[in-house]
Image (cartoon, rainbow, N blue to C red):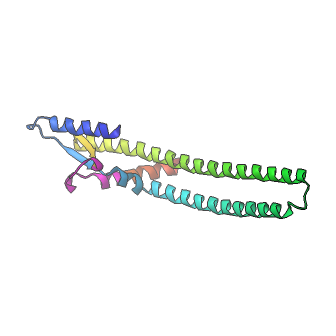
Amino acid sequence: MKKLASIFAIFAVLAMPAMAETKIAVIDMQMVMNGTEAAQDTQEKLRQEGEEANKRFAEMEESFKQRVEDLRRKKEILSEEKYLEEESELRKLYRDQQSEVQSVNERLSREYKRVQKQISDEVDDIVQDLAKERGYDAVLRRGYLMYASKSVDITEEVLKRADSALKKKMSKKGL
């Protein structure tokens, strides 16, 4: 949908009369979205949380494997009823562990998306303000263009403003 909108924007700009001086700017949104300190801090925080969770999950898995092996060794000693009971407990434990893994992954994903949305909203506002300040008729994403002169690239300016605005928001209420 965004590509379609960008294509229409490009055609709209091209359709403007040649006599009118059209001011166009270009932005590398991926660079802005990943380059802000807020994005980098969030990525690092989530990476660390993910590593800690993976370590915990590996320990849980090792413990689970040990319990399965212990049950296999006890199979001849235990009554069938007791064996089935312990096997059922292990199945439940396995499901619970899988559920916890999924829950942690979903939580980390939600947190990443939440922060990305906040950054995106802030960047959209900054781009609109910058376009009004400098009189741009259109701001296009670099990814949709074959070529754009460096002189029309506003990526660095948007990145600086986004970092500044996001720092203020983070100090007030946190991202």
Is residue 90 one of those drawn in magenta?
A: no
Relative to 77, does residue 17 appear above or below in the rendering? Answer: above
Residue 41 percent location from the top left of the image: 49, 58
Relative to 113, does residue 60 appear above or below in the rendering? Answer: below
Compare residues 82 and 104 and report the one nearer the observer: 82
Residue 125 placement: quadrant: top left
Residue 93 percent location from the top left of the image: 75, 52
Q: Which residues are magenta?
A: 142-159
Is residue 157 one of those drawn in magenta?
A: yes
Residue 1 left/right relative to 10: right
Q: Main secondary structure of the magenta part?
A: helix
Compare residues 88 and 110 and report the one nearer the observer: 88
Please report the residue visible at 24 percent of the width from the left and 48 percent of the height from the top: 145
Q: Is residue 174 visible to the viewer in this orientation of the structure?
A: no
Compare residues 21 and 96 and report the one nearer the observer: 96
Q: Is residue 97 visible to the viewer in this orientation of the structure?
A: yes
